[in-house]
Amino acid sequence: MTSEELAQQVAEQAMEQGLTVATAESLTSGQVAARLGAAPSASTWFRGAVVAYAPEVKFSVLGVPEGPVITEECARTMVASVARLLGADLAVALTGAGGPDEEEGEPPGTVWFAVLAHGRVHAEKQRFDGDPPQVVEATTEHALRLLLEHARVAGGAAA
């Protein structure tokens, strides 16, 4: 399923359940938000995004503790902060090493994701292969899958 198709399904779930959605993105530079913003009726359910590419933006805008940013703690803080700042019921955050080089001791393609739904946060680490554009696309698709999965769970449907 393409990222556009995933975003359309997120839109359907959000509209059916009255959910508002937000994103906090680093290595994808707003690609998840762009897909969501292009989905049906986005103005009714999509609250917006914070693109915090530079570590200093993560620290100052999203309240991430200073230190490494390719961490579970960073992703969890990013998602909780963006949900609070933008008033979203459902949010996803991601931070990682897009490549082509290692960052913070992590190999290229290492990404931490966090999803907030109904006040609970789920975090996971993934590793994607490929050059930076391929890592960005794989990360975007995975973030949208996570939003869809958690929107379905929030609504009581099978994920």
Image (cartoon, rainbow, N blue to C red):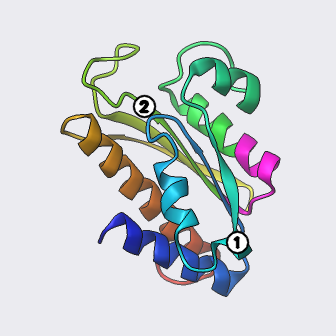
Residue 31 is a magenta residue: no
- Expressed as whole percent of the image width and height from the top left, the position of residue 105 reads 35, 13
Badge 2: how crowded within 10 Å, few (<14), some, or many (20+)? many
Badge 1: how crowded within 10 Å, few (<14), some, or many (20+)? few
Q: Is residue 4 left or right of residue 69?
A: left
Mark 2–mark 1 Cα distance, whole angstroms, equals: 29 Å
Q: Residue at image x 60%, y 32%?
A: 52
Q: Is residue 132 left or right of residue 6?
A: left
Residue nearer the viewer, 97 or 117: 97
- Expressed as whole percent of the image width and height from the top left, the position of residue 87 reads 81, 56
From the image, tell me which residue sits under label 2: 96
User: What label does residue 73 carry, if any?
Assistant: none
Above/below status of 128 relative to 39: above
Residue nearer the viewer, 81 or 136: 136
Q: Residue at image x 49%, y 69%?
A: 149
Above/below status of 159 relative to 99: below
Q: Which residues are magenta?
A: 81-90
From the image, tell me which residue sits under label 1: 43
Q: How many marks?
A: 2
Residue 82 is a magenta residue: yes
- Expressed as whole percent of the image width and height from the top left, the position of residue 45 reads 70, 72
* Residue 152 visible at all: no
Amino acid type, callout 2: Gly
Secondary structure state at the residue bearing disc 2: strand
- Expressed as whole percent of the image width and height from the top left, the position of residue 151 reads 58, 71
Residue nearer the viewer, 121 or 52: 52
Q: Residue at image x 74%, y 22%?
A: 60
Amino acid type, callout 1: Ser
Q: Is residue 93 left or right of residue 58?
A: left
Secondary structure state at the residue bearing disc 1: helix
Q: Earlier in the sequence, mark 2 or mark 1?
A: 1
